[in-house]
Image: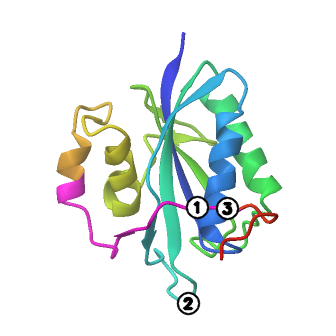
Amino acid sequence: MSTNAFIGLGSNLEDPAGQLARAVAELAALPASTLIAQSPFYASRPVGPQDQPDFVNGAVWLKTTLTPHVLLHHLHTIEQQHGRQRIKHWGPRTLDLDLLLYGNHCIDDERLTVPHRELANRDFVLQPLLDLDPDLALPDGRPLTFLRQHCPDNQLRKLPPLVRTPLNNPQP
């Protein structure tokens, strides 16, 4: 049986919007999974240390038969392929993929916490999720629209769609 899984994406190094676009394509290619939708990308201030570039964030909605821990393994693999290094908590990164919601499941073990622990405090997570499904709620029934209204402001800015021009056909 397929489960709705919502993945948060973030980057603030090495062409952040490009990192996210490539990650969306890689998520769409995961086994036993179908990409249902992708949110717009947003820019926002970093959480934690401010001596780093702004982040670009977004979210995707997958339908998957992968278990949450197997899906998490795939997310970590994609992060590593993008050169992710876990040096500083809340520090700069090439790619961050978080399993935000997995159906109505609540998971809290040594490897995974779902819903994501900080989801309710991050406008750059809540807004992309609401773009995907405005009726989303946490497993405890709290609507994400309510959480978004009470979320700290992180200077969220919607970015224009990413358009790539083929190298062999440059725009004038």
Above or below 147: residue 139: above
Taking the image as drawn, is residue 67 in sight? Answer: no
Q: Quadrant of the N terminus?
A: top right
Q: Position of residue 13 (x, y in %)?
A: 67, 75
Residue, disc 2: 51
Q: Position of residue 48 (x, y in %)?
A: 48, 77
In the picture provided, is 68 more to the left or to the right than 150? Answer: right
Measured Cα–Cα span from mark 1 to mark 3:
13 Å
**Kind of residue at disc 3:** Gln
Which residue is pictured at 65% across the width and 77% down the height? 172
**Kind of residue at disc 2:** Asp
Secondary structure beneath dot 2 equals loop
Report crowding for label 3: few under 14, some 14 to 19, many 20 or more residues within 10 A (C-alpha). many
Above or below 102: residue 78: below
Query: Label for residue 19?
Result: 3
Asked whether the beta carbons under mark 1 and mark 3 sit within 8 Å of each other, the answer is no
Which residue is pictured at 33% across the width and 76% down the height? 155
Measured Cα–Cα span from mark 1 to mark 2:
29 Å
Secondary structure beneath dot 3 equals helix
Whether residue 151 is in magenta: the answer is yes
Q: How many marks?
A: 3
Asked whether the beta carbons under mark 1 and mark 2 sit within 8 Å of each other, the answer is no
Residue, disc 1: 163
Give the mark nearer the N terminus: 1 vs 3. 3
User: Mark 1 against mark 2, which lies toward the viewer?
Assistant: 1
**What type of secondary structure mainly makes up the magenta span?**
loop
Measured Cα–Cα span from mark 2 to mark 3:
21 Å
Highlighted range, magenta:
148-165
Secondary structure beneath dot 1 equals loop
Q: Position of residue 7 (x, y in %)?
A: 53, 43
Name which quarter of the figure residue 110 lies in.
top right
Above or below 100: residue 141: above
